[in-house]
Amino acid sequence: MNSIFADLKNRVLAAERDPAVDTGPAAVALLRDWLATHEATVSAAKVAEPTEFNGTMMQWFHWYSDADGGHWRRLKEEAPALAKAGLTALWLPPACKGGSQWDVGYGIYDLFDLGEFDQKGTVRTRWGTRDEYIAAVKACQDAGLQVYADVVFNHKMNADNQEDYPATPFDPADRNRPLGEERTIRSWTLFRFDGRGGRHSTMQWHWYHFDAVDYNSLDPDYRAIWRSHGAGFEHNVDLEKGNFDYLMGCDLNVSHPEVRGELKYWGKWTLETVSVDGFRLDAIKHIASDFYLDWVTELEEHVRRNIFVVGEYWSYNLESLNWYAANTGGHMSLFDAPLHLNFHQASRSGGNYDMSRLLDGTLMQHMPLLAVTLVENHDTQPLQSLESVVEPWFKPLAYAVILLRDQGYPCIFHADYYGAHYSDNKGGTTYEIWMPSHRFLIDRFLLARGHCAYGPQYDYLDHFNTIGWTRLGTPGHPRAMAVLMSDGAAGNKWMEVARRNTVFRDLTGHIREPITTNGDGWAEWRCPGGSVSVWVEEAVLPEMGVTL
């Protein structure tokens, strides 16, 4: 943590010195306050770590990952290889019991059942058993990888029984508009967790722990969002549909003291039971932002250390993301959804996308200290709810952007690394999907990230098709690098690396001939059409274990 803290501090100071660095409204001030608050804790730890750190996480699952119960066992075996490749952290799927052994984990039933109890027709989850999960986390940490657990607090599903209670119908398209008076409804809101029998937690959930549902079995054809008696829709949520508190299932009322207390207890229990290093928070734009600020603060006080947290506020609106970051005091990172959208649009434009604007409107550009950058995830992959595919030809360019630039904390997608083959039904038609593996180039980018992606960055984002940047290195990592990409024809560009008369090679292998810089440390770099080249000093190749 010392190295991460130092990096944050240096970046904040750089942003204060250079007004050209746009970190978003109030972001620098918020981060300065956070750093000041935590400086004593970090300094007191006195943990000897490298002064330079290029963290890289991987989302170690996708929506259609095998449902054979072997996911945790495979992870335990794969952990050393992932660390050796250059990864430093893994985001794991929701480990809690869903509605069946095929549930990906977002149809959440019991937070405290990690594959330990016979509930919903299965002991194991889609991913495996509790013991296998804990063993996989330990194997990752033994290999030097941090582990981030996926947290699903927005809703519960697959209740044990129905309950009758008073509720008011609201327009699904405008949650500020009631459709009638309060009446008695019947809905699936009773969660007893009989198979667990009170182990780990004795709380049972009833209708008053939820602020809304979307189903009334007394009038099943009536479309409405049914707001529970005594509850209100949460404030400080996304304003789509007037108020986007309600998303699906039984929507948790995080204003209820029993709910708030149980979720805090679960967080502490997870840190103690599984020993994860951080969390990925699901669907945060539907949950009052002040709740998570309170939740993270209490967990950090409990374990007396900082916890990495990244939230899924999936919005392409930069102002909304800036608002959320400010409202949570910079205490959590956010996924850079606008950057993903730019990648998607560029990949569909057939060379007609203005690459000089690839970073426009992104967290990477405007709030790099809080940006978790990504190319694809389980929601955007083909046939899923937010499908917005980044076409395979463009993915090497996109991964070069997130892995080799200075800004952001990059997240690699499992299906992009290993490839994926699956089928699913959409709109009455069954589709078969093949997602190719980009592992070779991602591994090469990880090598470049570990050896050369340090120090000053010179940007050459000045052409409609061909853009690039260079990294000049630091005393601890003195190797330079030049990255050039084109979404159109083969590209070339003069860029400076501050290395005189030095031989460079294209680490991707796309261009076989070397390039030598001139006496001023410049060279005319090249890349193939619709592709990317990563030029590193020839002398660094033996350190990387690469022969070109």
Image: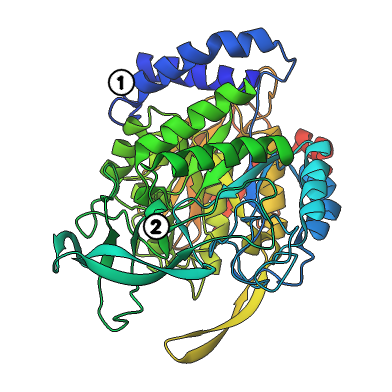
Label 1: which residue? 19
Instruction: Identify the image quadrant of residue 538.
Output: top right
Q: How many marks?
A: 2
Quarter of the picture containing the N terminus is: top right
Say few, some or many: other residues with alpha carbon within 10 Å of mark 2 (under 14 / 14 to 19 / 20 or more).
many
Q: Residue at x 36, y 49 (%)?
A: 285
Q: Amino acid at mark 2?
A: Asp
- What label does residue 466 carry, if any? none
Give coordinates of residue 415: x percent, y percent.
64, 64
- Label 1's element? loop
Give coordinates of residue 295: x percent, y percent.
48, 34
Mark 1 vs mark 2: in front: 2
- Label 2's element? strand
In the displayed structure, does residue 34 sit left or right of residue 222?
right
Say few, some or many: other residues with alpha carbon within 10 Å of mark 1 (under 14 / 14 to 19 / 20 or more).
few
In the displayed structure, does residue 150 sit left or right of residue 363?
right
Label 2: which residue? 251
Q: Amino acid at mark 1?
A: Pro
Question: With respect to residue 392, does 343 lie above or below?
Answer: above
Residue 536 visible in this rendered orientation of the protein = no
